Image (tube, helix red, strand yellow):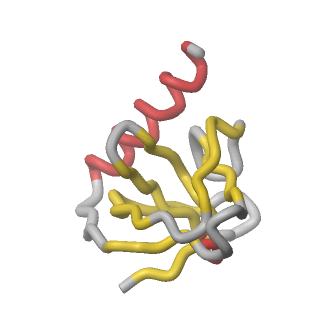
Amino acid sequence: MPAVLFSLLIGLFILAAAPAQAAICTVMGPPDAKEPIYGKPAGPQTGVVKGGTVMTTMGGGHDPSGRTWLLVGRGATRGWIDRTKLICK
């Protein structure tokens, strides 16, 4: 648990250094589908969100392979999700 918290804090620190633009995004997939969220881009899985969940983005980043990730949140649920799993306005 401390490693997950530490990873999340590092991610938030990095985002604080760069201006973030908030967007409203919906998790793709049917309501019974579950998409994983992570403590950092391409890091350890920290939870799941259901398809159709509306979330607010709080920043973005890339992993070593070049994939784009967004830091998303909804209430107490926060984490990184692969950009290709979201539809954003």
Question: Which x, y percent locates residue 15?
Answer: 34, 51
Q: Picture quarter containing residue 30?
A: bottom right
Side of 82 relative to 73 (left or right): right
| Image vertical order of residue 31 relative to residue 35, above or below | below
| Image vertical order of residue 3 relative to residue 89, above or below | above
Q: Picture quarter containing residue 23?
A: bottom left
Q: For the view shown, which residue lies furthest in the top direction? A: 2
Q: What residue sits 43% from the left and 81% below the top? A: 88
Q: What residue sits 63% from the left and 72% below the top? A: 85
Q: Quadrant of the C terminus?
A: bottom left
Q: What residue sits 50% from the left and 23% below the top? A: 6
Question: Which x, y percent locates residue 17?
Answer: 28, 49
Q: Picture quarter containing residue 22?
A: bottom left
Q: For the view shown, which residue lies furthest in the front direction? A: 32
Side of 35 relative to 58 (left or right): right
Q: Quadrant of the N terminus?
A: top right
Question: Which x, y percent locates residue 82?
Answer: 63, 65
| Image vertical order of residue 29 relative to residue 65, above or below | below
| Image vertical order of residue 57 relative to residue 16, above or below | below
Asked whether 66 or 73 is in front, the reply is 73
Q: For the view shown, which residue lies furthest in the bottom direction? A: 89
Asked whether 32 or 60 is in front, the reply is 32
How many marks can you see?
0
Q: What residue sits 37% from the left and 37% below the top? A: 76
